[in-house]
Amino acid sequence: MVSVEKSGTFALGGDSVVRRLGYGAMQLAGPGVFGPPKDPQAAVAILREAVASGVNHLDTSDFYGPHVTNQLIRKALHPYADGLVIVTKVGARRGADGSWQAAFSPKELTEAVHDNLRNLGLDVIDVVNLRSMFGIHGPAEGSIEESLSALAELQRKGLVRHIGLSNVTPAQIEEGRRICEIVCVQNHYNVAHRADDTLIEELARGGIAYVPFFPLGGFTPLQSAGLSDVARRLGVTPMQVALAWLLRRAHNILLIPGTSSIAHLRENLAAAELDLPHDAIIALDEVGTRTNAAA
Ligand SMILES: NC(=O)c1ccc[n+]([C@@H]2O[C@H](COP(=O)([O-])OP(=O)(O)OC[C@H]3O[C@@H](n4cnc5c(N)ncnc54)[C@H](OP(=O)(O)O)[C@@H]3O)[C@@H](O)[C@H]2O)c1
């Protein structure tokens, strides 16, 4: 079985130590992240194999399904092993048609934290990310003060250990850090989508983790000649190269690639062992420069 041990570790909030290669559970729900998967047993097997391979950082949300991925995590892994860190996010809810809607009021956020606790079978959630919904597809400005203060209140009550932010701008992160400790930021980033390059360094200086969502391109997986060339030269797959590049990019980057396939899971976790030579890193840096210049 592959092991993610070589990916190294990072201490979220100084005390929740995770291996840098983790797993994102969003792909375990049904099509469109709505409803149950076709094969719930396969989803359970993926979660168990991830943890058996050393993954101790799982990313989820109660709005995946809704409730579906949290219930699968509970079914597969409860009672949870010591050291397993489950990170969830609040701030959205699903319409009956599967639409993604903002749920950013203190009342909705409190209900969401309780839904996560119940569906995961936990008394305390390790990390809750406040997912900004000012922009659905990317960060947009708007004050997060009222919502984050509500989450900080739940932290004071002992329901939440650490707080993070998702889909946010640098100004929102600054605003957030004045309200409570922020241990991680989860934004869209990968080898071809590099808008947060500067932000990653700033967060590293503050000891804050950066957790890219869509590390493999998300719903339209990455396709790039540069990535494929490097993969061919090294005899590995483009997705492994994309993950290995992220691990090398900065020590505060934590990976949560998602998949509904056990073969892809194994392939992705094996990226922990992949060393990228210097010339490959230079070629991969070019992938982002070219894509971002064209955007
Ligand atoms: N905060 C936010 O707003 C936000 C938004 C999106 C996601 N997230 C989190 O980030 C995690 C990762 O994002 P994601 O799952 O959307 O995107 P991703 O990890 O970038 O990519 C997942 C996609 O790539 C495919 N894939 C995975 N491994 C592959 C491989 N080895 N070869 C070929 N295709 C492969 C998957 O299909 P298969 O299932 O067929 O493998 C799926 O279509 C999610 O699980 C979720 O926890 C957060």
Image (spheres, grey):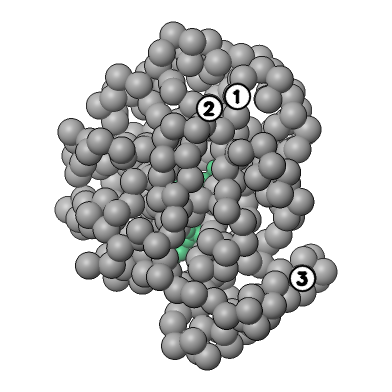
Identify the residue at image location x=53%, y=27%: 163
SS for tag 3? helix
Q: Nearer the viewer, residue 147 or 84?
A: 84
Q: CA distance from mark 2 to mark 3?
A: 32 Å
Question: Residue lying farthest right?
Answer: 293
Give the left or right position of residue 63, taking residue 39 as reference: right
Q: Which residue is mark 3?
A: 289
Marks 1, 3: nearer the viewer = 1
Kind of residue sitting beneath label 3:
Thr
Residue 194 spot, x, y in % from top left: 71, 59
> In 3D space, how far apart are the residues under numbered discs 1 and 3 (Cα atoms)?
33 Å
Q: Earlier in the sequence, mark 1 or mark 3?
A: 1
Left or right placement of residue 262 versus residue 244 in this view: left
| Image coordinates for residue 244, horizontal then vertical, percent | 51, 68
Find disc 1 in the rendering and name its residue. 181
Which picture quadrant has residue 228?
Answer: bottom right
Task: Give, as a three-letter code, the residue at label 1.
Answer: Glu
Q: Is residue 225 above or below residue 122?
A: below
Residue at image position (74%, 29%) is 174
Q: Residue at x 31, y 39 (%)?
A: 84
Query: Which element carries disc 2, helix, strand or loop?
Result: strand
| Snapshot quadrant of residue 105 | top right
Sequence-wise, the earlier of marks 2 and 1 is: 2
Type of the residue with mark 2: Ile
- Does 42 sit above or below residue 1? above
Quarter placement of the C terminus: bottom right
